[in-house]
Amino acid sequence: MKIYITHYTPLVDRKQNIIKQLTSAGITDYEFIETYDREQLTRQDIEKFSHISMSEASLFLKHYEIFKQNLENDDIIIVLEDDAILVENFKEHLANYIEILREKTWDVAFTGECCNIHAKNVVQGQHFYDSTGSRGTCMYIINSGVCKKLYNIFNQEPKILLAIDHWFNLIGKKYGIKYFVSEPTLVYQGSELGLYKSAIR
């Protein structure tokens, strides 16, 4: 079980802060995805996209790189964006969530806080709820084998017209991707909290 962090390299403070948080949480098995910065995108990189900004295409490709690196991976992986703010006792909560997920049928579990989106009819003691779409990509967990599914969906779509969080909404119904959202969430979005200026907008 490995953590991947999408990172826009000019934002050094974000990288330093998330390393500090992960270290404090006792987490050492993580990797920063630092390819596909917007300034480095080639014509070939961006020809797949239409109607989205260069920064949105850049972020999307960083997530895509994670899918690509895990085509043959047979374990669960965790994805964070570089503005993630971890909750207290993050490692313990994450381990508990993974244990619960291993007993369920699912593809992607969205565990980050975004736009105050929460499951309806929350039940005490229940942590995962069916969802028809994403809850942002600040943090999500991908089940074993699903990276290949996401990679193939990206490649078979003629054009990508949406930022990655909205793309997840689109492909869920179209391709039968099984989503969960968690209650409570495990990370907050630093950009949403006002700790960082948005790197997308």
Image (tube, helix red, strand yellow):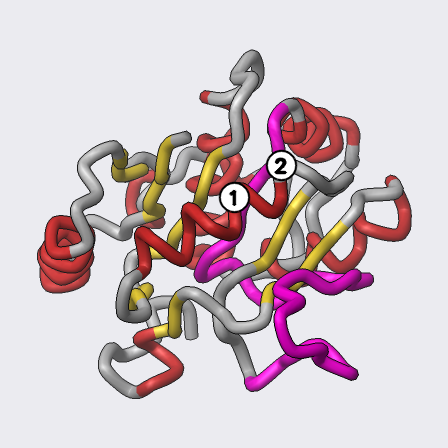
Which quadrant holds residue 48? top right
Which quadrant holds residue 151? top right
Q: Is residue 129 magenta?
A: yes
Q: Secondary structure at mark 2?
A: loop
Amino acid found under the numbered disc labelled 1: Ile
- Answer whether labels 1 and 2 touch (C-beta < 8 Å): yes
173 vs 140, left or right, is: right
- Towards the viewer: 122 or 161: 122
In whole angstroms, how far apart are the C-alphas of marks 1 and 2?
6 Å
Residue 41, above or below 182? above
Number of on-image labels: 2
In percent of width and height, residue 145 lies at 65, 23
Q: Which mark is residue 98?
A: 1
- Towards the viewer: 167 or 140: 140
- Residue at 65% x, 78% y is 124
58 vs 166, left or right, is: left
In percent of width and height, residue 70 lies at 50, 21
- Residue at 52% x, 36% y is 64
- Residue at 42% x, 41% y is 62
| Stretch in magenta | 116-144
Residue 111, above or below 121? above
In percent of width and height, residue 133 lies at 75, 62
Amino acid found under the numbered disc labelled 2: Arg
- Towards the viewer: 181 or 39: 181
40 vs 167, left or right, is: left
Q: Quadrant of the C terminus?
A: bottom left
Q: Residues within 10 Å of mark 1 (few under 14, many from 20)?
A: some
Q: Quadrant of the N terminus?
A: top left
Q: Which mark is residue 102?
A: 2
Which quadrant holds residue 85? bottom left
Q: Is residue 97 magenta?
A: no
